[in-house]
Amino acid sequence: MMSGRRLQHKVCLPAGAALLLCLWVSAAQSQTVYRVVDEQGNVTFTDNPERGGEAMTLAPLPGVSTSPPLGAVSPRRQGYPGKPFMPYDRFAIEVPQADATLRNDHTSVVVDVAPPLREDHRIQLLVNGEISQSALHSDAFWLAGLSAGQHQLQAELVDSGGRVQHRTDPVSIFIVD
């Protein structure tokens, strides 16, 4: 069993530490800031009054609430519950087919997107892991100038913020002269 004196120390110590922390924070907030202009017109701010600056009156910092107000309703997500971000039933490279052998001239790449691409989404094309064509609101691309040999194609779904949200499986193709 814990003695009364020991219990008193266990309660008082954290309370005292919290009080000291509050006093320290309020002291830091109440310090005066001085504006100093040197010979070249450079402005600096300091908490040292000996540098000969003028005292500044600062507006209090705004507080930030970390908990929602009482009675606030949490925002609901749009769409169907339980669905991931991917709003498409299908997102894959349709043309060319995997392991296709193609000539070195213009190569058509078609991405199968169902339902149709949303207005705020774009598709960008990657060749061998590098962006070949920047994000466009299109599901068809043209490739030109690929060297002979094997290449790997992928398409990425990019949202309105420029973040990649989905990537197709890689499709290997072979280019011949």
Image: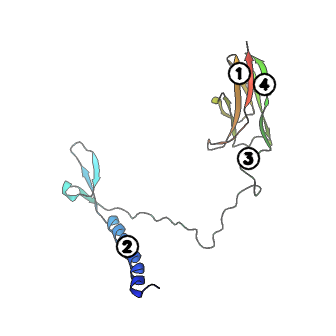
Q: Mark 4 or mark 2: which comes first in sequence?
A: 2
Labelled disc at residue 17? 2
At 41% from the left edge and 75% from the top edge, which residue is drawn?
Answer: 14
Q: Residue 141, how many percent across, how many down?
A: 73, 28
| Label 2, label 1: how far apart the Cα atoms are | 67 Å
Callout 1 touching callout 3 (CB < 8 Å): no
Determine the image quadrant of residue 51: bottom left
Q: CA distance from mark 4 to mark 1?
A: 9 Å
Residue 125 appearing in the image: yes
**Pointer 3 and pointer 4: residues touching (CB < 8 Å)?**
no
**Mark 4 or 1, nearer chain start:** 4
Closer to us: mark 3 or mark 4?
4
* Residue, disc 1: 150
- According to the picture, the residue beneath numbered tag 4 turns out to be 99
Mark 2 surroundings: few (<14), some (14-19) or many (≥20) residues within 10 A: few
Mark 4 residue element: loop
Q: Quarter of the image containing the C terminus? A: top right
* Amino acid, disc 1: Gln
Asked which quadrant contains residue 102, the reply is top right
Nearest the eye: 169 or 34:
169
Which residue is identified by label 3?
Answer: 86
